[in-house]
Amino acid sequence: MKEEGVKKVNMSILETEIDLITSIKNDFAIFENSSDLPVLDYPSRLEMGMMAICLRGTTRMSIDLKEYTFGANDMVIVLADQIVQQHQRSDDFLCCVFAVSIKFAQEAILSYRQFLPTLLRIKEDPRIPLKPEEVVSVLEYCSFLRQRVNMRDNCFRREIAKSLFHALFYELGNIMNRHAPAVGRQVKTRRDEVFEQFIHLVRDHYKAQRSVTFYADKLCLTPKHLSNVVKGLTGKSAGAWIDDYVILEAKALLKSTTLTILQVSEALNFANQSFFGKYFKQHTGVSPTQYRRM
């Protein structure tokens, strides 16, 4: 059987499909020509981070299968590995979009962990309504980045872009903190490291491993200690984080592919279709078949 799964969108796809785009190949891109943005028929997983500011009009889209409507002066942040789907947009819709690869972001922002509470909040609610002066401030960064990236004879343009993105990231952090002050530490702790390593492991293994013990063993911790750390930092248990990844993938596969329910259960390493159906209904309240028909 040919493998079928959730469609993935990466930097290369953006650079290929969008005409008027300012970019450094496979690193980051800025564009405003919203008409080139595809209205995706099915949920797609981002292999990059994206930030967009709606300048006019409205758009309706889903992020991790939750539906939102965004309008003028709304900033939207979608984290890498989240699942997105744009359902529709108004005829006058216009936005400025900034996309960055995971590698480029990690190179530019070595201390991003201090924003862990903010990043967790974004995952729960990606919309930040901006004041007019905040919109102007962010657009100034985007304009300056676009100018510098377009200087293709500058042999240091990637390094310049990296520094400017670093500054933009902290500007965005300051804006988000003004709207909803983050509570917590400003210095990375061992607990932060454990949570970060746990999430990376979950992203790599959730399709095959749903046991907290598996991840605790990988981190050389007891399941109880791992659960206490994750619960203390995020308010959600380690098991709940694992279940969220599994259920999100299951929902996306049910909605965006022609896989049978048996094939979905096999893709997620369930012993049989019946066990998958009970697991899915326990976490969603409906059966896989009912969800697919919704």
Image (tube, rainbow, N blue to C red):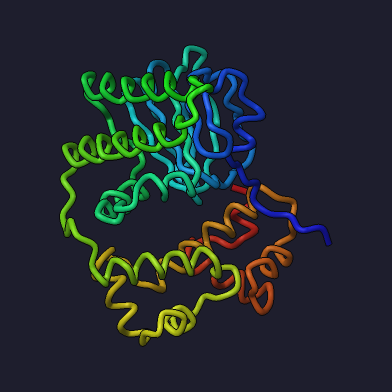
Whether residue 168 is situated above or below residue 199 in the rendered picture: above
Front one among 136 and 239: 136
Whether residue 34 is situated above or below residue 284 in the rendered picture: above
- Tell me which residue sits at (28%, 66%) in the image: 192
Q: Is residue 191 left or right of residue 292?
A: left
Q: Is residue 12 left or right of residue 241?
A: right
Q: Quadrant of residue 38?
A: top right
Q: Is residue 41 left or right of residue 160?
A: right
Front one among 75 and 282: 75
Whether residue 7 is situated above or below residue 168 in the rendered picture: below
Residue 96: image location, x then y, percent: 43, 23
- Tell me which residue sits at (51%, 63%) in the image: 203
Residue 111: image location, x then y, percent: 29, 53
Front one among 206 and 71: 206
How many marks on residues? 0
Residue 267: image location, x then y, percent: 68, 66
Could you tell me which quadrant the N terminus lies in? bottom right
Front one among 260 and 96: 96
Whether residue 126 is situated above or below residue 4 in the rendered picture: above
Residue 48: image location, x then y, percent: 51, 44
- Tell me which residue sits at (61%, 30%) in the image: 15
